[in-house]
Amino acid sequence: MGMEWIDASKKLPEESERVLLFTPYPIFGEDNSCVGNRESIKTCTTRIGKQEAPIFTHWMPLPPRPDLKSDKTGRRT
């Protein structure tokens, strides 16, 4: 699985898949990304002139979770 941005106008994530979302709009201050899903892409919009446009233009799958193992004391290593 590559770590490349996918154009949301060409392909959407699976229905329940959590993904990293990108917006070119300054809605999060200096941070242009957040975690969301397909519904976030479809419903979060901004007004540009007289039209509503999706704020999230690109997405990518989240990386796999780290493999957390516990030591003898139960602490994660």
Image (cartoon, rainbow, N blue to C red):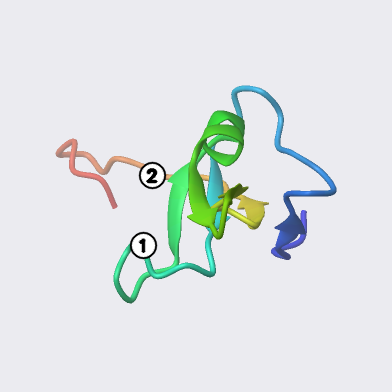
Disc 2 vs disc 1: which is toward the camera? 1
The answer to the question of whether label 2 and label 1 lie on touching residues, with beta carbons closer than 8 A, is no
In the image, taking residue 27 as reference, residue 14 lies left or right, namely right
| Secondary structure of residue under mark 1 | loop
Determine which residue is flagged by label 1. 27
- Number of disc labels: 2
Residue 33: x and y in percent read 45, 61
Residue 31: x and y in percent read 36, 70
Residue 20 appears in the picture as rendered: yes
Q: Looking at the image, which residue is at 33% across and 76% down?
A: 30
Q: Residues within 10 Å of mark 2 (few under 14, many from 20)?
A: few
Q: Looking at the image, which residue is at 47% across and 67% down?
A: 25
| Image quadrant where residue 76 sits | top left
Q: Looking at the image, which residue is at 81% across and 43% down?
A: 11
Q: Look at the picture and state if 30 lies above or below 35.
A: below
Residue 53: x and y in percent read 61, 50
User: Can you tell which mark lies on residue 68?
Assistant: 2
Q: Nearer the viewer, residue 29 or 69?
A: 29
Q: CA distance from mark 2 to mark 1?
A: 34 Å
Instruction: Report the residue that reaches farthest toward the right.
Output: 10
- Mark positioned earlier in the residue sequence (2 or 1): 1
In the image, taking residue 2 as reference, residue 27 lies left or right, namely left
Amino acid at the residue labelled 2: Leu
| Secondary structure of residue under mark 2 | loop
In the image, taking residue 70 as reference, residue 12 lies left or right, namely right
Amino acid at the residue labelled 1: Ile
In the image, taking residue 49 as reference, residue 26 lies left or right, namely left
| Image quadrant where residue 18 sits | top right
Q: Nearer the viewer, residue 44 or 17?
A: 44
